[in-house]
Image (cartoon, rainbow, N blue to C red):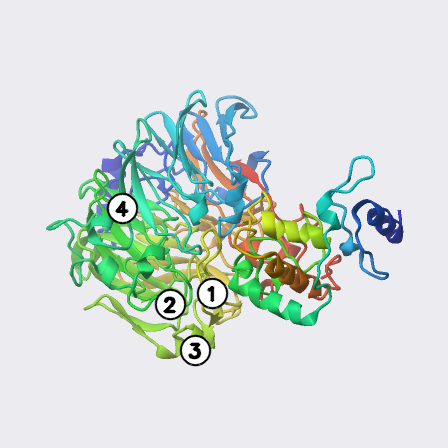
């Protein structure tokens, strides 16, 4: 374990410092990786420092395992007690590898019975975003609306509870967050007109303790008098009055991204996804609290504050991306902040105690808004980019609905460099909305949205971002959208992956490329690093393109002779470099 | 076995029509009947087969019933498979496509039989059968 006091001392001494990671309880041991974001602050920063810009060129693969599943391998493994835990996409097999033995043989595998009907309800490939280790259990979601707790030592199922309703369009690919004795989960289904929620389960039994809706009346949203204090405006039932008629009942507003937690404030933060359908004319109003960040108390789910990034979403700009917690000096004042890279293309630095927006600047090319008005928290819109069925085909909106950054690809924050490391997407779109009727259990979308590469022609970039100033510090352009998560280390090395199947290491201070290795399929998962039983630093990552790319690339699969497609116009040659895969890779010096 | 021979064999087993010159992608070999008898669904015939008006109506229904939400506009494939490539997981005969829509399929295709009348389902079938067969699918060259 890296001594935290020494780290803090170092930070104080750093020029331009004043940035410290928020509380990282209970994951201070950098030998392990116990939760998706590495720590409750979701920094994906590891104190391990054996790998450096001077030696990372010698990084080599030491092990590789086929999961047997060919779908988007999002998320990341866990490493606990010298065991690596891997959750596959549907059918959500859980593998436990023994890292103390040569060849890392399986200790056990858990093979749940998952309803294949979920394959037709999951909007965007049958992915899973990973597990959480707590109380000797591996907790994760099955795609078909169940949460399971598995004994980390034996693989025995401790509990298995139904949390979501497939027949109403809900699936559950997100990774749970565990705080004390509460397991917090949410559904996907923004493209199925679900009525979005978060739930708190009891860690010991899986029993449902609370359900908090993301729209609707205050009672359903767990808004309590005197507790809920949103930063810009307060009225009763904002989740109800900002929707046309009873459209809040099919709000969408899903919870499929990453959750964070601040122990001092006792607040859980999560992003809420898009409102449904994509034709905004069917749901006049702000549509609160879609496309928002919500801060709740984990114990009872009470809503403490909420902030909406994109009111009355016209562009499918979900806000499910991670909320990274850091203590940051903004405009000369130390602030406890939350940093969020929204699909809408703005990077937000927000006071995480109150929800007040401190900084909001574009981190990619965008044209749907001119800026964020910090006095109201609202975007200043460009009316020529409004969409709707009556507006026909609205051309060239940036970013595309893939987002300036995908919520899938969780960014990282290094307290050593004070920088955030972000996988970004440079695509624009046309948006032709149409009126849609909701048919329960079928998609509720209603827009045709072809993409084109954004300004510059490259479709992605890996960037370093100064969230105190709202400025890009450096950038590595990539041919394809960058869709992987990121890990950054105390050795000042950042790792990310590309859709054409490279795992890359770069100098976290300068952005200089240092090393790359072709992992066999596009990377949509998040690399991690850990200390092995032999004391060495390892890096692990999944290879296995998928998620949106299984839908929109056209031709990445090879396992179904009855499904052969032309490549997508905007990314015709991606299939030249990758097909579906499902591998776990481990690297070391 | 040559393509015409496959077609001839399938035509006996599964009552699949094989037009001369249809690409190999048009094969339909999803069900092998034990002994000789094909399952009953294969004997169903599309009453609107080849009718352009029905195909147009079916195309509108493809949008209004949210089929395009999974299979994409033009049925070219999205989260669900392409239905325009003349390749079929569960069979491409009139009756098989009808059954897929009416009863659903296990890997996520919802059952629409309680929602849509047989006439409407047949119009969807007619639409799918009217889509042009893509020429360049089997080989991709860069």
Q: Looking at the image, is mark 3 or mark 4 earlier in the sequence?
A: 4
Reading the image, the residue beneath label 3 is A391
Reading the image, the residue beneath label 2 is A282
Q: Looking at the image, is mark 4 or mark 1 earlier in the sequence?
A: 4
Secondary structure of residue under mark 4: strand
Q: Residue at x 53, y 51 (%)?
A: B114
Reading the image, the residue beneath label 1 is A446
Could you tell me residue A170's position as x and y percent?
42, 47
The answer to whether residue A19 of the structure is visible from this angle is no
Q: Are circles 2 and 1 on residues that touch, CB within 8 Å?
A: yes
Reading the image, the residue beneath label 4 is A212
Could you tell me residue A493's position as x and y percent?
42, 46
Which quadrant of the figure contains the N terminus of chain A? top left
Q: Looking at the image, is mark 2 or mark 1 earlier in the sequence?
A: 2
Secondary structure of residue under mark 3: helix
Instruction: Between residue A69 and residue A523, name the one nearer to us.
Output: A69
Q: Looking at the image, is mark 3 or mark 1 earlier in the sequence?
A: 3
C-alpha span from label 4 to label 1: 27 Å
Q: Quadrant of residue A290?
A: bottom left
C-alpha span from label 3 to label 2: 13 Å
């Amino acid at each position: 374990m890296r001594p935290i006091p020494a780290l803090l001392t170092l930070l104080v001494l750093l020029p331009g410092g004043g940035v410290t990671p928020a509380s990282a309880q209970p994951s201070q041991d950098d030998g392990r990786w116990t939760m998706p974001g590495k720590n409750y602050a979701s920094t994906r920063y590891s104190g391990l420092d054996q790998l450096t810009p001077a030696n990372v060129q010698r990084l080599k693969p030491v092990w590789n395992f086929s999961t047997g599943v060919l779908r988007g391998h999002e998320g990341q493994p866990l490493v606990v007690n010298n065991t690596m835990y891997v959750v596959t996409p549907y059918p959500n097999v859980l593998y436990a590898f023994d890292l103390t033995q040569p060849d890392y043989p399986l200790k056990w595998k858990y093979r749940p019975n998952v309803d294949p009907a979920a394959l037709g309800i999951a909007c965007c490939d049958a992915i899973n975003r990973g597990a959480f280790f707590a109380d000797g259990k591996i907790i994760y979601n099955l795609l078909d609306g169940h949460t399971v707790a598995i004994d980390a030592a034996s693989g025995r199922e401790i509990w298995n509870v139904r949390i979501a309703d497939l027949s109403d369009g809900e699936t559950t690919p997100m990774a749970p967050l565990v705080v004390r004795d509460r397991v917090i989960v949410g559904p996907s289904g923004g493209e199925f007109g679900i009525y979005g929620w978060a739930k708190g389960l009891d860690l010991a039994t899986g029993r449902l303790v609370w359900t908090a809706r993301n729209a609707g009346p205050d009672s359903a949203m767990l808004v309590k008098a005197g507790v809920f204090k949103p930063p810009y405006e307060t009225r009763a039932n904002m989740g109800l009055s900002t929707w046309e008629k009873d459209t809040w009942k099919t709000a969408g507003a899903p919870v499929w991204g990453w959750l964070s937690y601040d122990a001092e404030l006792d607040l859980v933060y999560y992003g809420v996804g898009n409102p449904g359908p994509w034709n905004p004319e069917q749901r006049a109003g702000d549509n609160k609290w879609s496309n928002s960040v919500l801060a709740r108390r984990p114990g009872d789910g009470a809503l403490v504050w909420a902030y909406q990034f994109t009111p009355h979403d016209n562009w499918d700009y979900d806000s499910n991306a991670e909320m990274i917690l850091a203590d940051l000096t903004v405009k000369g004042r130390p602030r406890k902040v939350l940093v969020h890279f929204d699909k809408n293309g703005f990077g937000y630095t927000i006071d995480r105690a109150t929800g007040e927006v401190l900084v909001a600047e574009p981190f990619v090319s965008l044209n749907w808004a001119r800026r964020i008005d910090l006095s109201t928290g609202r975007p200043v819109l460009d009316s020529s980019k409004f969409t709707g069925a009556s507006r026909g085909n609205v051309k060239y909106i940036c970013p595309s609905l893939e987002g300036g950054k995908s919520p899938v690809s969780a960014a990282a924050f290094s307290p050593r460099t004070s920088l955030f490391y972000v996988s970004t997407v440079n695509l624009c779109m046309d948006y032709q909305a149409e009126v849609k009727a909701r048919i329960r259990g079928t998609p509720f979308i209603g827009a045709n949205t072809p993409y084109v590469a954004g300004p510059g022609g490259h479709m992605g970039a890996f960037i370093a971002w100064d969230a105190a100033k709202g400025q890009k510090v450096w950038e590595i352009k990539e041919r394809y959208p960058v869709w992987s998560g990121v890990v950054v280390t105390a050795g000042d090395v950042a790792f990310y992956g590309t859709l054409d199947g490279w795992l890359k290491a770069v100098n976290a201070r300068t952005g200089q490329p240092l090393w790359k290795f072709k992992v066999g399929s596009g990377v949509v998962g998040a690399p991690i690093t850990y200390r092995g039983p032999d004391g060495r630093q390892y890096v692990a990552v999944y290879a296995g393109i998928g998620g949106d790319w299984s839908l929109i690339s056209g031709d990445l699969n090879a396992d179904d002779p009855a499904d052969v497609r032309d490549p997508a116009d905007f990314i015709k040659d991606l299939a030249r470099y990758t097909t579906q895969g499902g591998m776990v890779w481990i690297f070391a010096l | 076995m040559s393509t015409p021979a496959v077609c001839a064999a399938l035509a006996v087993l599964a009552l699949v029509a094989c037009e001369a010159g249809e690409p190999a992608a048009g094969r339909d070999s999803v069900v092998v009947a034990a002994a000789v008898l094909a399952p009953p669904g294969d004997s169903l015939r599309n009453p609107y087969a080849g009718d352009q008006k029905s195909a147009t109506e079916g195309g509108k229904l493809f949008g209004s019933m949210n089929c395009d939400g999974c299979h994409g506009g033009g049925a070219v494939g999205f989260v669900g498979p392409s239905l325009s490539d003349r390749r079929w997981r569960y069979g491409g005969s009139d009756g098989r496509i009808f059954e897929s829509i009416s009863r659903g399929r296990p890997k996520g295709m919802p059952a629409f039989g309680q929602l849509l009348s047989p006439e409407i389902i047949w119009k969807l079938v007619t639409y799918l059968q009217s889509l042009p067969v893509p020429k360049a699918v089997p080989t991709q060259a860069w």
